[in-house]
Image: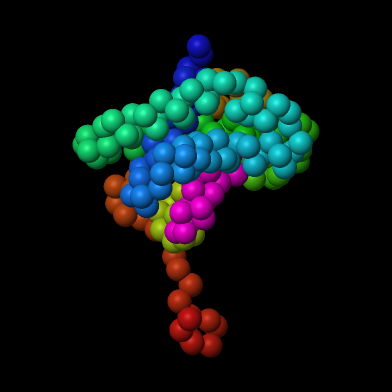
Amino acid sequence: MNLIYFLDIAGTFAFAISGALVATRKKFDVFGVIIIAFVTAVGGGMLRDILINAHPINWMGDLNYIWTILIAVLTTFLFRSKIANLRKSMFLFDTVGIGVFTLLGLQKGILFHLPPSVSLIMGVVSAVFGGVLRDVLTNEVPLIFKKEIYASACLAGGLTYLILNSFGVPENIKFSISAAIIIAIRTVAVIYNLELPKVKKDIFGEKF
């Protein structure tokens, strides 16, 4: 198991737990919790593969994703009261996960000969749309639309990857640098409670 694959699985585990926690707070039944954990963990990659007509769909080609999600759900049921104490660790996995998901999605777009800009969008879709699907299905405003620098960090890291790629930088180096940028931006934004500016007035000074 190479490092990138391990980080991918770790990110999937963290995303699945975040989905399972939301579903249990909403008092969903066991089936509902599994579904929310599933779409949170692999929904972004699945949507990406559907958009670019890639087969097999991400989780269908590797059953380790399914087992990872099921273990995450079981872990949530057994240790829900203790997981709160592991928030820092889960945040780390989640942050590393969005970095890896962004770059893997971007790479897949390049592999399918999509334009760089479209490949970048596919990377962001891979990283954030599992959370969007989770929030929509649980009747919440998606996190990326209301606070936290999340998708913006993915864009910055993905753009860095494309720039380094244009200069022929070796794969391991450009992947590591780009992932580090995503992780750093996301971490700094959370620590210092940074948010993107909100539009509160139009050009005539009228408030929304």
Quarter of the rendering containing residue 47: top right
Main secondary structure type of the part rendered in magenta = helix
Give residue 68's position: percent from left, percent from top.
Answer: 46, 25
Would residue 103 appear left or right of 12 to someone viewing this image?
A: right
Give residue 107's position: percent from left, percent from top.
Answer: 65, 30
Name the foreground residue: 176 vs 78.
78
What residue lies at 66% left-to-right and 39% top-to-bottom?
48
Colour scheme = rainbow
Q: Is residue 16 visible?
A: yes
What are the residue bounds of the magenta stretch? 125-140
Give residue 102's position: percent from left, percent from top.
Answer: 56, 37
Residue 21 is one of the magenta-drawn residues: no
- In the image, residue 60 sits, relative to residue 195, either above or below, namely above
Name the foreground residue: 179 vs 56.
56
Quarter of the rendering containing residue 89: top left
What residue lies at 58% left-to-right and 41% top-to-bottom?
44
Residue 136 is one of the magenta-drawn residues: yes
What residue lies at 50% left-to-right and 11% top-to-bottom?
1
Would residue 123 appear left or right of 15 to someone viewing this image?
A: right
